[in-house]
Image (cartoon, rainbow, N blue to C red):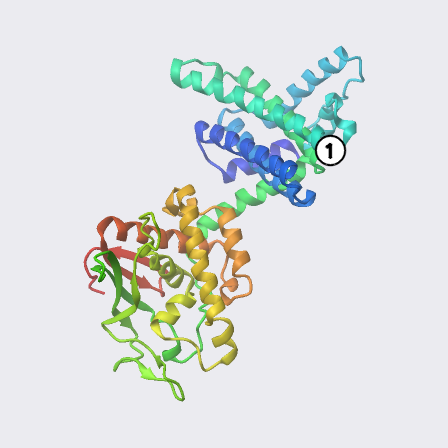
Amino acid sequence: MLLDEYQRRIAAAMRQDELICLLGIGAHAGALLQAHRNYLSNHLDSEESRAQVRRQLALLVTELATLASGNDLSLDAIARANLYKISDRASALEIPRPSIPSGPLTGNAYQRLAGVTDQQVKDGVDPLALSIPMLGLAGEVGTLLVAQKKAYRDNATEASDPKFLTIELGDLLWYAAAVATHAGFTLEDAFDEGLGYAERHVEELAKLENLPDDLPVLDEGFVLTERFPRLMVIRFRKVLADNGNSQVKLTLEQAEPIAFPDGPVPIPDSTKHQGFAIPGTLGDPLNDNSFRADAYRYHDAIHLGFTAVMGWSPNTRSLLGVKRRSDKTIDENEDGARAIFAEEGMAAVLAKLSAHRQGFLAEDAVDDDTIDMLVTVFEDLEVARMPRWLWRRAVSQGFVAMHNLNRAGGGFLRVDLENRQLHYSRVKPLR
């Protein structure tokens, strides 16, 4: 792939200001070092380690290309200037100089030519040989960040000087190529992965702006008494337990359509009941179940985010009493204890992760690693039919609702499955 073609496609997908790009470069450089540290200290599988390195390098190079575009610099020109620098260094080392082509450069051609002055290149895929370019890459990132710091603090102009940026981004590209070489993949492999991420992200955002009409409805085809109501209003209200501690009680205030106009009905040959009452209590009152107050008593908002956006939640289905008992396989495998425990466990994990993901208060805060985890945990359940990008909205809306409930000390959630929206209000919505 031509360097300028790669840069053009990245620029079309990623539009960020200079500071965001620099912080991204720093963040991904740190993640690269962390991935390699894990490999060296924890004896991780080399293939898994290589995949992590490739992913973080891919993301770093996308930021590099975006930074170059923002400063009207060509990635080809940056690479070419770096190769002339390499040629001079090769001459000083008394080794053959690279033959720099006159035409446009591809990523792999640059990687091959840049390897002329890689003094560890003969070591191949070796932990120490990989450590050297990683440390060098971190050093180059530091140079860029220091220059930007001086620009903000002292109004220094070095950070925006085209010559300075051409040299420093060229050196950073050299170390990126060396990391790829010693990790056993090509620079264009990283290009492909980074482009896939950037272009997929743009496509996902477009779909979230205008949800497709053909998204699956997971309980479609079941009788009304075994389906989620398409619209619900649920109240979260603080109550005092017998010991004086604060708890949260959930009440179903509204449901459309109403499958149980007379309330729950007995299940034949069972002591259990099916269905819900309006108004009716959902589950038991909850507290944080922790030594630390962390708003987890409102965590049912996470399940309701899944319910509204994905049309899926074994926990909510159990609370409402609308398990699909007419199909024994579905009842056991999709609505049973294992699915409920999996979802409940994931809600707890997400609540912990949220502290490191801006509270999941924006769809962009739900990163690919989080989505990968959700997809993996639920891969054997019906929700796997839903597009992975929809998890961004499901998780974010659940946590936004949880945040609002905690801040206000309660309120109402409008669970709209038709429009795949979870909405918070302090007073009961009219509809």
- Report whether 261 appears left or right of 107: left
Q: What is the tally of numbered marks visible in this picture?
A: 1
- Report whether 88 appears left or right of 239: right
Q: Secondary structure at mark 1?
A: loop
- Picture coordinates of residue 162, whole percent (x, y): 53, 17
Q: In front here: 175 or 125?
A: 125
- Picture coordinates of residue 152, whole percent (x, y): 40, 19
Q: Which residue is mark 1?
A: 126
Q: In front here: 280 or 185?
A: 280
For the point 20% across and 55% down, the residue is 426
Q: Which quadrant of the rendered structure holds the N terminus? A: top right
Q: Residue furthest top?
A: 92
Q: Which quadrant of the rendered structure holds the C terminus? A: bottom left
Q: Amino acid at mark 1?
A: Asp
Quick check: 293 above or below 157? below
Inspect this view and state whether residue 208 appears: no
- Picture coordinates of residue 85, whole percent (x, y): 67, 16
- Report whether 160 appears left or right of 155: right
Quick check: 108 above or below 346? above
Quadrant assignment, res 346: bottom left
- Picture coordinates of residue 7, whole percent (x, y): 57, 33
Quick check: 302 above or below 284? above
For the point 59% across and 32% down, the residue is 33
Dot 1 surroundings within 10 Å: few (below 14), some, or many (20 or more)?
some
Q: In front here: 345 or 48?
A: 345
